[in-house]
Image: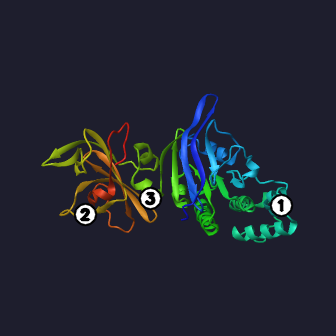
Amino acid sequence: MNHRITLTVEQITKSYSDKKVLEGITFDVAEGEVIALLGPSGCGKSTLLFLIAGLEKPDQGAISWQGHDLSGIPSHRRDFGLMFQDYALFPHMNVSENIAFGLQMDGKEQQFIRDRVSKVLDLVNLRGYEQREISTLSGGEAQRVALARALAPQPVLLMLDEPLGSIDRTLRERLLTELSHILRQLRQTAIYVTHDQEEAFAISDRVVLLRDGHIEQIGEPQSIYQHPSSRFVAEFLGLTNFIPGTVKTSFGKQFVSTSIGDFPINSGYQGEVTILIHPNGVTLGTKENFQLAGRIVNITFRGNTCRVTVDISSQLLNFDFLSNEAINKIGETIYLNFDPDRTLHIFQDPFNPINR
């Protein structure tokens, strides 16, 4: 990854009718980096994208490209590409005409336009679709045409606003893989807006996770998943194994006392805490060698993996295993082992969590 910073967003604030939609948003994007703006509906993701695109103006703060302030630059002169969720294709134009539209608006020569349209159609695997009418395209084909149109002018920054939101899950997973490959192949600097953490993790180099107009956490996907900065982040990512406890000290060593047992921890915590056990960090033990034991109350198969819900001292916890592992039946006892450094995360205060 080239770490030369291209886009810089500093202390951006935006309000509508006295309601703050964004406040104090600060992050940057490196050349060739794919950033995902992730968060629940209404957290400000699309508004932030429109501010960067120049379709809206911030109330406070600055947005710059390679150190140059963009506040006086209209959207059509920023050389940014924008792809919407509904694709916004022109129904009265065929595929080729849709892709060529932006190039024609830029005054490009006809031969350049023909060559460029042909190139991006190859890139999105739609060679031969030049004369197809938009109304005849499937959802996946329309998505590819919209992507080709956004890429045709060779934008310095590509912005995608929930581009796969209206596509069924199977097709979405395939198109996500293709889109990720295209962005990497072009070394395209991009911002990808989504409310789906699986999409964000699959396509991005880093994730900017938003909540109520604020940045909750920024980091690489694996880092955010393994080390969520707050209980909100953990819950948004689908992590549910929260257990309240109390920090105690015995023989100079600290541990958290909980309803399912005692967990040794590093120093620096006191009083009431909440611990999080990652669902994918637990391994099967035996009756002779285990750290946790409980009764299986449910097993949900998910293809290559299965999720096992276990009742441990009246605490229901979810753990993930490979489907080919020898999981006991519902109602039987399961024995578990885990590595605290890999699977255990501690929040100092369940109402105002602090990352370890």
Q: In which quarter of the image is residue 35?
A: bottom right
Left or right? Give the position of 165 relative to 141.
Answer: left
Within 10 angstroms of label 1, few (less than 14), some, or many (20 or more) residues?
Answer: many
Q: Which residue is identified by label 2? A: 285
- Compute the Cα span from label 2 to label 3: 26 Å
- Compute the Cα span from label 1 to label 2: 62 Å
Disc 3 vs disc 1: Cβ atoms closer than 8 Å? no
x, y percentage for residue 108?
Answer: 84, 62
x, y percentage for residue 87?
Answer: 72, 53
Q: Is residue 285 above or below residue 24?
A: below
Q: Which residue is identified by label 1? A: 97
x, y percentage for residue 224?
Answer: 44, 53
Is residue 100 visible to the viewer in this orientation of the structure? Answer: yes
Q: Is residue 137 above or below residue 353?
A: below
Query: What is the three-letter code of the residue carrying label 2?
Result: Gly
Left or right? Give the position of 280 relative to 60.
Answer: left
- Tell me, for residue 222, which label it has, or none: 3
Q: In this view, does 350 lie above or below 32?
A: above
Q: Tell which circle, 2 or 3, labels the residue nearer the N-terminal end.
A: 3
Query: What is the three-letter code of the residue carrying label 1?
Result: Glu
Residue under the image location 31 percent in, 43 percent down? 274
Left or right? Give the position of 136 relative to 221.
Answer: right
